[in-house]
């Protein structure tokens, strides 16, 4: 019997993200009261949600042939459910297995598919456009780097991040989990080091300044080579 079979070798998980996100939902660290799963005010506050849905809908409906969209970090799907009808196919991905199982039961459409994946580790589903909303801000630089490399497979990428207002030092590293870089007066900029995302076009689609919360939620469109 090998050492591995005897249990003397422990394989350390590469990232703490799965456990952290499972804890967030289990302990309702983002709120939600009696809801089975709740992805926080960023997915439910009308001041944040409505402009995003309108902006992404306008983008998706600008194509004569509908796009295949991959929602990388779909959460409780309160936003994604409004976008499915504007796509050829909508693949909604999240790292929390129980959340994905819940979404599969709750949301049904012929062109909708849910997958439980760790987008920093697993192969991403194919598609035309990737939506990455309020995801990278929770992840370590090592995980963000791995994800950014995979995003080059898409023709279009739309990233939404909670950022400090005004000038800030981008991409300060954090441990993956509930918190974001805002506490360090930092935020994600995929074009800056260490990520250096190479794109053909960058365009800010939306900026929502928050009265109750600090910072600004910025949605940026990228067209890739």
Image (cartoon, rainbow, N blue to C red):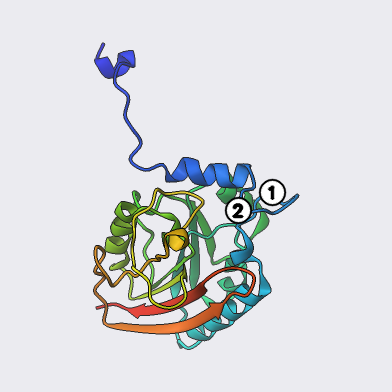
Dot 1, crowdedness within 10 Å: few (<14), some or many (≥20)? few
Residue carrying label 1: 36
Image quarter in which the C terminus is found: bottom left
Image quarter in which the N terminus is found: top left
The extreme right residue here reads: 34
Q: Nearer the viewer, mark 2 or mark 1?
A: 1
How far apart marks 2 and 1 lie (CA) works out to 14 Å
Residue 165 position, x and y percent, is 47, 76
Callout 2 secondary element: helix
Query: Taking 185 as reference, is 35 above or below it?
Result: above
Residue 94 appearing in the image: yes
Badge count: 2
Q: Quadrant of residue 32?
A: bottom right
Residue carrying label 2: 104
Q: Quadrant of residue 173?
A: bottom left
Query: Taking 198 as reference, is 204 above or below it?
Result: below
**Mark 2 vs mark 1: which is more N-terminal?**
1
Residue 179 position, x and y percent, is 49, 53
Residue 118 position, x and y percent, is 41, 49
Residue at x-position 64% and y-position 47%: 28
- Residue in front for this viewpoint, 135 or 124: 135
Residue at x-position 55% and y-position 79%: 208
Q: Quadrant of residue 200?
A: bottom left
Quick check: marks 2 and 1 in contact, CB under 8 Å? no
Residue 90 position, x and y percent, is 50, 67
Residue 56 appearing in the image: no
Q: Is residue 40 left or right of residue 96?
A: right
Dot 2, crowdedness within 10 Å: few (<14), some or many (≥20)? some
């Amino acid at each position: 019997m090998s050492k591995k079979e005897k249990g003397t070798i422990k394989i350390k998980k590469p990232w703490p993200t799965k456990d952290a996100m499972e804890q967030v939902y289990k302990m309702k660290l983002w709120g939600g009261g009696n809801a089975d799963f709740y992805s926080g005010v960023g997915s439910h506050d009308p001041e944040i949600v409505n402009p995003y849905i309108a902006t992404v809908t306008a983008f998706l409906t600008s194509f004569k042939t509908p796009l295949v969209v991959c929602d990388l970090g779909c959460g409780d799907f309160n936003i994604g459910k409004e976008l499915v009808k504007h796509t050829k196919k909508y693949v909604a991905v999240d790292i929390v297995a129980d959340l994905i199982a819940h979404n599969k039961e709750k949301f049904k459409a012929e062109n909708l598919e849910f997958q439980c994946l760790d987008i920093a580790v697993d192969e991403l589903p194919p598609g035309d456009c990737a939506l990455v909303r309020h995801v990278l801000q929770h992840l370590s630089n090592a995980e963000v780097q791995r994800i950014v490399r995979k995003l080059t497979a898409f023709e279009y990428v739309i990233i939404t991040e909670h950022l400090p207002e005004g000038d800030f030092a981008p991409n300060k590293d954090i441990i993956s989990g509930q918190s974001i870089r805002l506490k360090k007066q930092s935020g994600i900029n995929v074009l800056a080091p260490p990520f250096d995302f190479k794109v053909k076009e960058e365009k800010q689609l939306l900026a929502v300044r928050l009265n109750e919360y600090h910072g600004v939620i910025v949605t940026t469109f990228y067209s890739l080579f």
